[in-house]
């Protein structure tokens, strides 16, 4: 029987690339997100390559939806808590509280709701692996990013605590903490402003969703006695939140 990988936020970017990569590694994929058509296209792509994919359309911000869609799952061997976003880039005195709610409700509460349903299944099964998408923003807060950075600091803290909580149950917890990855992330952050999103990557060769998926696939296949607690990945032109070397175009 194939191992089952549940990936939240598989309609785009890192989550989509991870679904494709883990399918190629032999996992049966359970792909989630809010955009049904995107999930159907992913399922078709996975099945055309000989893989197996179930899709679940729900919003991780709704505890009721998370429970309704995830409680019936019989087994999950690998959970990739990936769904997340940045909304806005503003000083604290000008931030839009609707953006703040979206980030906290998705990046923190959504990750917790999903974990609360899946972790007991792993405990009952006697093992599993949870991979959380953190960020360098989880340890290096930057100007204009108070709430996004706070949400990823929360993911960093939750990942460390849950690793301890689940230790005796044989469940591995890994946090993947990327720097700049070119996905729909910046377009979402700037509410659809493509030019402003493109400027984020000007003069830099950013990481891709596939780069992060490769790391996730590597971490997931390590032998039972070995875990990666925390992995920080960056483009080689970036040294951290505060240092990016941009080549002149
Ligand atoms: P994308 O915007 O490309 O993908 C985000 C995914 O999250 C989409 O599939 C989206 O699906 C899903 N999602 C967002 N909100 C919800 C929700 N309420 N319910 C369910 N799914 C949701 O961005 P990335 O791939 O870059 O981001 C993935 C993760 O990686 C995020 O947690 C992000 O913070 C993190 N990250 C990204 C970095 C980057 O530079 N890109 C760097 C460090 C971390 P849909 O809209 O269909 O619901
Ligand atoms: C996404 C990377 O630098 O925008 O987590 O915080 S950054």
Image (tube, grey):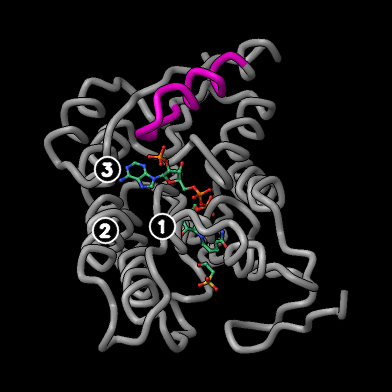
- The answer as to whether callout 2 falls within 8 Å of ligand 1 is yes
Q: Is residue 32 magenta?
A: yes
Alpha-carbon distance for marks 1 and 3? 12 Å
Q: Closest to the observer: 70 or 137? A: 137
Write down the quadrant of residue 226 in the picture.
Answer: bottom right
Pointer 1 residue: 85
Residue 113 lies left or right of residue 237; in this view the side is left
Pointer 2 residue: 102
246, above or below 23, in the image: below
Magenta part of the chain: 31-44
User: Quick one: SS at disc 1?
Assistant: loop
Task: List x then y, in percent, for residue 189.
Answer: 45, 62
Residue at image location 63% in from the left, 23% down from the top: 26
Q: Residues within 10 Å of mark 1 (few under 14, many from 20)?
A: many
Residue 220 lies left or right of residue 95; in this view the side is right
22, above or below 1, in the image: below
Residue at image location 38% in from the left, 34% down from the top: 33
Q: Residue 31 shows which numbered tag?
A: none
Quadrant of the drawing holding the C terminus: bottom right
Residue at image location 17% in from the left, 26% down from the top: 68
Alpha-carbon distance for marks 3 and 2? 11 Å
Residue 113 lies left or right of residue 12; in this view the side is left
Task: List x then y, in percent, for residue 47.
Answer: 61, 12
Pointer 3 residue: 60
Alpha-carbon distance for marks 1 and 2? 8 Å
203, above or below 64, in the image: below
Q: Is residue 109 magenta?
A: no
Mark 3 or mark 2, whichever is nearer to me: 2
Q: Closest to the observer: 232 or 144? A: 144
Give the mark nearer the N terminus: 3 vs 2.
Answer: 3
- The answer as to whether callout 3 falls within 8 Å of ligand 1 is yes
């Amino acid at each position: 029987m194939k191992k089952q990988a549940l990936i939240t936020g598989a309609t785009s970017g890192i989550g989509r690339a991870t679904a494709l990569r883990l399918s190629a590694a032999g996992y049966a994929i359970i792909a989630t997100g809010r955009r049904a058509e995107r999930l159907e296209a992913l399922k078709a792509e996975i099945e055309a390559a000989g893989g197996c994919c179930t899709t679940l359309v729900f919003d991780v911000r709704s505890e009721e939806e998370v429970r309704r869609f995830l409680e019936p799952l019989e087994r999950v061997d690998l959970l990739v808590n990936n769904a997340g976003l940045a909304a806005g880039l503003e000083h604290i005195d000008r931030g839009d509280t609707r953006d703040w709610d979206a980030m906290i409700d998705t990046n923190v509460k959504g990750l917790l709701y999903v974990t609360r349903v899946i972790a007991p299944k792993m405990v009952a099964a006697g093992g599993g692996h949870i991979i959380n998408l953190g960020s360098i923003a989880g340890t290096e807060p930057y100007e204009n990013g108070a709430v996004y950075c706070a949400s990823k600091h929360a993911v960093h803290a939750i990942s460390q605590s849950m690793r301890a909580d689940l230790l005796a149950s044989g469940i591995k917890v890994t946090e993947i903490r990327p720097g700049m990855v070119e996905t729909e992330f910046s377009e979402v952050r700037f509410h659809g402003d493509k030019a402003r999103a493109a400027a984020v990557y000007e003069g830099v060769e950013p990481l891709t969703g596939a780069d992060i998926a490769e790391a996730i696939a590597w971490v997931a296949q390590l032998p039972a006695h070995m875990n990666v607690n925390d992995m920080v990945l960056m483009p080689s032109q970036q040294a951290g939140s505060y240092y990016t070397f941009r080549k002149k175009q």
